[in-house]
């Protein structure tokens, strides 16, 4: 009896245990692979974004508020009342602060699907906007689990130490966090920290 209940439970929840291969991922090219990170080139693309500030970016209410603004946009709160496919990753562009008690300003963004890149649908909400993100090169490190703000900060610190030791000149006043999974993905979660490489 228990075995039957357990099997039924697995069958019910299994669709949300892994990553959804149908979700469009923002394009990039891996330029170089290091022991603990990659060097990537991201082409110029458009993203839909919203700004906020928080002491705990990934654990505070500001995270949910920002996500909801963007989710409402793709759910039809736009000038065309059109539903737009969810994409990956969700990125966080973070203004770093040396004061651990200070709020950090951040921009949360969804990648706009390729079908809408040439003519993005405009948001209706005043606090949501289309970001025309220029092409850039990053160093990027990946880690798993349900990541906290501290997890992202530790990954960024390790990335900084490794990449600068390899001679990369990084922009350190800001950095990116990226998450690729829904809250319902249990296994094989993908989180990343990025630093932009300063142009020569």
Image (cartoon, rainbow, N blue to C red):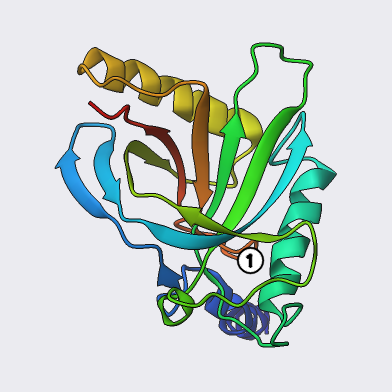
The local crowd at label 1, few if under 14, some if 14 to 19, many if 20 or more residues have their Cα within 10 Å, is few
- Residue at the location (48% across, 68% down)? 18
- Residue at the location (43% across, 82% down)? 115
Left or right of residue 141: residue 101: right
Count of labels in the image: 1
- Residue at the location (36% across, 56% down)? 44
Where residue 34 sits: x, y (%)?
Answer: 19, 33
In the rendered image, the residue lying farthest to the left is 32
Which image quadrant: the C terminus?
top left
Left or right of residue 108: residue 165: left
Query: Which one is in front, 25 or 3?
Result: 25
Read off the residue under disc 1. Answer: 184
Query: Which one is in front, 61 or 182?
Result: 61
Where residue 165 sits: x, y (%)?
Answer: 25, 13
SS class, disc 1: loop
Where residue 63 sits: x, y (%)?
Answer: 74, 48
- Residue at the location (48% across, 79% down)? 116
The vertical placement of 33 against 103, above or below, is below
Which image quadrant: the N terminus?
bottom right
């Amino acid at each position: 009896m228990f075995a039957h209940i357990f099997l039924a439970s697995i069958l019910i929840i299994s669709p949300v245990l892994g990553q959804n291969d149908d979700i469009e991922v923002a394009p990039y090219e891996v330029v170089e692979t290091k022991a603990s990170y990659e060097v990537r080139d991201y082409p110029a693309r458009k993203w839909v974004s919203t700004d906020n500030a928080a002491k705990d970016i990934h654990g505070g209410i500001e995270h949910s508020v920002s996500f909801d603004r963007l989710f409402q946009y793709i759910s039809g709160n736009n000038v065309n009342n059109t539903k737009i496919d969810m994409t990956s990753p969700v990125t966080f562009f973070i203004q770093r602060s040396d004061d651990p008690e200070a709020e950090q300003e951040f921009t949360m963004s969804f990648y706009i699907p390729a079908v809408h890149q040439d003519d993005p649908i405009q948001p209706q909400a005043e606090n949501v906007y289309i970001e025309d993100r220029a092409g850039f090169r990053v160093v990027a490190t990946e880690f798993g689990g349900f990541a906290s703000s501290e997890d992202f900060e530790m990954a960024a610190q390790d990335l900084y130490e490794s990449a600068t030791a390899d001679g990369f000149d990084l922009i350190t006043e800001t950095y990116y966090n990226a998450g690729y999974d829904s809250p319902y993905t249990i296994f094989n979660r993908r989180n990343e920290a990025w630093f932009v490489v300063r142009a020569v």
